[in-house]
Every structure is written in C-alpha cells, then in structure tokens.
Image (tube, rainbow, N blue to C red):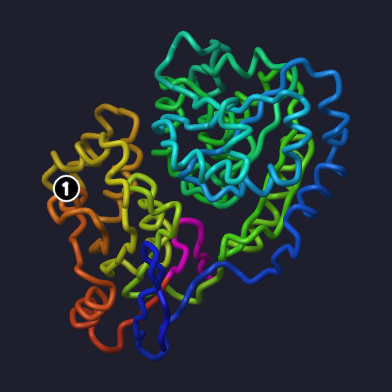
C-alpha cells in the first residue's frame, strides 16, 4: 500500500506493509461556496439575533481572531462579513494566548486579501502586559481570571474560530477565544497546569478542569458576544459553520467536529506515523499534539514516528528545558510534580508517551534538540519506517495518522 505523507510543501510517498491502516478524519462533503455557508450561518444564527442586527448601535466592535498556529479560515469569514465589519468600524485582536505576536507574513496569512483594510485595525494580545488586563476573580479551580481590557472597552464582541479536538482542553473553539486567547500569563499558566489532570483529555468537556476554567471565564464576559465557529475537513476545507450565541454555536460545532475527527480502530498498532500538517507543524510546541494523538493508536512498547517540520523551531522552550535537564521520562514527571511552570504540561505529555514507547521524528530540528525531548531524529520518512519495521519485524502492525494533531483514534 502506497500513501503520500505531507511534509512542508511536499508529499512524500511511502510503501506500507500489507494490512496497514491509514487513520484520518472521516470524509464529509465540503461547502461548494464557503462564503454562502458563513453568510447563511450569520443570517440565521443559533439563539441570537442575525449579525446585522447584533452590530446595530454598536459604538465599538471588537473581533477576536485566531493566530497563525490554527487552521481557522479567517479570510473566508471576512469574505462573507468583512464589509459589515468595516462599516461598523470594527477593530481586531489576535488571540495569541501566551504565544508570540504574529509576524507580518502571518498577519497576511490570517487576514488574506483583507490585510490592507484590516491590518491597521489589528493588534496582538500580549499576555505579559499586566497593565492591559482586567482582574475578574477566580474560577472554581482557583485559577485567577485576567482578561485583556479590550474586551471590556467594546460594546459588541465578535468571536471567530475553528472547532476540532484538543488534547487537553477537549476541543478548540468557543470559550477558548477568551481563555487562553486573550488571557493574562498567570491565568494561562494556572489553567494549563490543570492539563496534568487525567480528566484533561481530548473530546472531554464537562468533567475536564481545563475546560471548566474556560467556561467560568466566559460567564464573566459582560458584553454581548456573537460567535462564528467553523469546522474543517481533513483537507482543511470548510464543511460547517455555526454562528450565534457562543455556547450554543460551540456545542453545534463540536457535534459536527466529533463526527469528523473521532475515528474508530479495532486495535492498537506496533508502529504509528503521526503527521503534524500545516499550520500545526510550525514548531515542536504545537506539533506535540501529533505525539499525543498518535500515542492513542500505539501499543505499549511501540514506535511512534512524528512527522513535523517544526519550521519555526521549538516554540516556547520551558518544556524542552525541563525535559532536557532530566535523565529519563520518570525523572521529568517527578520534577514537574514538584513545581509547575507554563509549558510543563507539554513536557508531561511527552514524558508519559516516552515512558511507554520509542518516539522518533522527521523534522527540521537538529538531533541534539530532539534528544532533549527523548525523541530521536530520523533522516526521512521512508527510512524511519524501514528502521522501525526492522526492529518490530515484518508482521508488525502499522498505522498512519495523516492529520495527527486533530485525529483522535478510539478503540472499538
């Protein structure tokens, strides 16, 4: 069986043993006209006035958009409603969370053909700027709630996003626009520490403490909020758009996303190739999600091959520093338990997988950097597969996750 694996701008062909399994999001019909899909959603929203009515009388309208680490089709949304936003004098804030601000190239990626008219109205949230944040108390889990004051200076807030499984928040989208999207650093750090909980897993929302924090923050937003949540397929084509009241539109998008990204497997594989596709391949911090989802498909003692260019390097380095200072995964987990810093949840997730499997990577990162994360560098995808098969034997079961950062393998 031959399959083409995406890497940077190329498709790398590999030959899989007979009986191998290609695991990818379920096929759905893409929108023939994405603009009409978005337009229809905002004109007939869920539990809300239509967008035009929502914007009436607004003195200041704030639009929250995702940064370049997410596949959200912001430009398609702006194709549909950009004229209304321009007429309303809307300003934009990029929900960076604790990420860096976008580069100008990334602003162009986010805004697309609307860069010229909306870039002068767009700023990036800065989680470390305490003077720009409002203190709203604490969540039920004790997390301090600090949010960008731009949210509270607006008369109307429009939230855009995409909904897909998230390895510790349950799902992206909806409430994540506020926390971590425009939250303070202390808020994000405390919230992400909850990712160490065994209940902080993909697809789980109600009993997930990370998601609970996000819901608690959302309840404290005093401004009218209109949400536009998109759902993409495995080719990152727009297949769904749910708009209106933020909780209801998010719930509807989750149902659509679940039917796409939760994929059944009969049994775990001995070798798993898990791919971080663009734009999630931006760095090791984001690409790690391919490790976490790939591990769900992997038998204990197996070999996990992450395919991720990490074209922008490591990303936030705290998790790598922690892993690199530990002699083995068990020591890393012990040290994380003794004292948490933002990013250590990422180290914990990698250490848990490394404690039960061999992690390898085809990446632009050098071998020494990967070694700090208990990952061994491979020169190519075909060579990585050949080496794994030589270790596990010709009868080894192989699975390939062609979109490993969002595909959630479920046994049964």
Please state the horizontal and vertical placement of residue 283, each as a whole percent of the image.
33, 48
Query: Which residues fall within the magenta stretch?
Result: 401-412
Q: In this view, does 75 lie to the left or right of 132?
A: right
Count the labels in the image: 1
Give the farthest residue toward the front. Answer: 116
**Whole-percent x, y for residue 122 in the image:** 56, 27
Residue position for label 1? 372
- From the viewer's perspective, is residue 391 above or below residue 306? below
Q: Which residue is drawn at 58% across and 38% down?
A: 115
Quarter of the rendering occupied by the C terminus:
bottom right
- Front residue (pair 10, 138): 10
Relative to 96, say whether 56 is above or below: above
Residue 213 visible? The answer is no
**Residue 44 visible in the current orientation:** yes
> Does the magenta-highlighted stretch encompass residue 81?
no
> In the image, residue 152 lies at what x, y percent?
65, 14
Left or right? Give the position of 284 relative to 141. Answer: left
Q: How crowded is mark 1: few (under 14 residues within 10 Å), some or many (20 or more)?
A: some
Residue 177, relative to residue 351: is it above or below? above
Given residues 54 and 191, the one toward you in this image is: 54
Q: Which percent across, then down, holds residue 330?
A: 20, 46
Q: Residue, x 49% and y 19% (percent of image)?
A: 142
Q: Quadrant of the N terminus?
A: bottom left
């Amino acid at each position: 069986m031959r399959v083409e694996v995406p890497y940077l701008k190329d498709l790398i062909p590999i030959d899989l043993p007979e009986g191998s399994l290609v695991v990818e999001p379920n096929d759905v019909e893409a929108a023939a006209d994405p603009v009409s899909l978005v337009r229809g959603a905002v004109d007939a929203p869920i539990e809300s006035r239509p967008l035009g009515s929502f914007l009436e009388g607004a003195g200041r309208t704030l639009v929250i958009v995702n940064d370049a680490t997410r596949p959200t089709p912001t430009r398609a949304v702006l194709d549909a409603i950009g004229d209304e936003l321009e007429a309303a004098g809307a300003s934009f804030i990029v929900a960076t969370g604790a990420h860096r601000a976008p580069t100008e190239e990334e602003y162009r990626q986010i805004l697309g053909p609307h860069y010229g008219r909306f870039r002068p109205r767009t700023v990036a949230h800065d989680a470390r700027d305490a003077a720009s944040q409002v203190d709203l108390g604490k969540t039920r889990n004790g997390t301090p709630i600090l949010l960008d004051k731009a949210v509270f200076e607006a008369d109307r807030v429009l939230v855009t996003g995409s909904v897909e499984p998230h390895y510790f928040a349950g799902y992206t989208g909806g409430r994540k626009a506020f926390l971590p999207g425009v939250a303070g650093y202390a808020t994000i750090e405390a919230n992400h520490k909850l990712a160490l909980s065994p209940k902080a897993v993909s697809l789980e929302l109600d009993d997930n403490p990370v998601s609970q924090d996000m819901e608690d923050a959302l309840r404290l937003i005093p401004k009218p909020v209109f949400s536009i949540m998109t759902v993409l397929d495995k080719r990152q084509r727009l297949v769904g758009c749910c708009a209106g009241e933020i909780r209801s539109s998010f719930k509807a998008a989750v149902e659509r996303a679940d039917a796409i990204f939760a994929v059944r497997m009969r049994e775990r594989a001995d070798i798993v190739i898990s791919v971080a596709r663009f734009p999630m391949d931006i760095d090791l911090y984001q690409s790690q999600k391919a490790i976490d989802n790939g591990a769900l498909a992997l038998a204990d003692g197996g070999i996990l091959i992450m395919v991720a260019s990490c074209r922008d390097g490591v990303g936030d380095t705290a998790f790598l520093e922690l892993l690199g200072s530990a002699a083995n995964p068990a020591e890393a987990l012990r040290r994380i338990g003794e004292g948490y810093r933002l990013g250590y949840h990422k180290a914990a997730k990698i250490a848990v997988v490394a404690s039960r499997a061999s992690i390898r990577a085809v990446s632009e990162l050098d071998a020494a950097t990967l070694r700090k994360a208990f990952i061994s560098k491979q020169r190519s995808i075909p060579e990585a597969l050949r080496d794994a098969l030589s270790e596990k034997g010709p009868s080894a079961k192989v699975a390939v996750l062609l979109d490993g950062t969002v595909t959630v393998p479920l046994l049964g």
